[in-house]
Image (spheres, grey):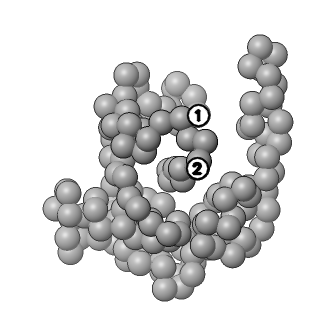
Amino acid sequence: MLLWPTETAGHPPSALAGALNRPAFAPFAGRRSCPLAFPVDAHVIDAATVIEGLRAYDAAAAAQHGLAGRLLPLPAGAREIAFDAALADVAGLVPGRAEWRRDRLASRARRQFEPREEHVAAPPPDAAGPTTAAGGVP
């Protein structure tokens, strides 16, 4: 998961990272019956593009957990990165395809959701470098 702050962000990135690293409730993926297998291990990283941020996260996670030299190399195009259409200009990626997700909250009282556009792209060949074996997979 990668969060990109905007001008209207309600909380500073350091507060979000702290809350993710020490959650008040057990985090889950989609449904409560799907708890996360590993801790979130959130880091605040300053980067110009998504690819730079993911590279910096891998380096920070490797340094923090002593994973230097034990990272798994990924073949080019082995992963895809999905990002919100509104962030296409800061993502630093060329969108490969557009997909629609019906997950933007329209009405909490009526439990209604509206569609949003999401772009999916493969990282450039030079960006398919190492990734951490546990936790920091982009």
Query: In the rendered image of this protein, does residue 43 appear above or below residue 114?
Result: below
Residue 34 x, y percent position in the rendering? 50, 32
Identity of the residue furthest to the bottom in this view: 126
* Badge 1 density bin: few <14, some 14–19, many ≥20, Cα 10 Å: few
* Marker disc for residue 30: 1
Residue at point 36% right, 67% down?
A: 56
- Disc 2 is placed on an element classified as loop
Residue at point 53% right, 69% down?
A: 49
Residue at point 37% right, 22% down?
A: 24
Query: In the rendered image of this protein, does residue 69 appear above or below residue 66?
Result: below
* Marker disc for residue 48: none
Identity, as a three-letter code, of the amino acid under mark 2: Thr
Q: How far apart are marks 1 and 2 (CA)?
A: 24 Å
* Badge 2 density bin: few <14, some 14–19, many ≥20, Cα 10 Å: few
Query: In the rendered image of this protein, does residue 72 appear above or below residue 111?
Result: below
Q: Where does label 2 land, which residue?
A: 6
Residue 16 x, y percent position in the rendering? 42, 38
Residue 86 x, y percent position in the rendering? 72, 56
Q: Which of marks 1 and 2 is nearer the N terminus?
A: 2
On the picture, is 116 further left or further right than 30? right
Identity of the residue furthest to the top in this view: 109
Query: In the rendered image of this protein, does residue 81 appear above or below residue 123?
Result: above
Residue 68 x, y percent position in the rendering? 20, 70
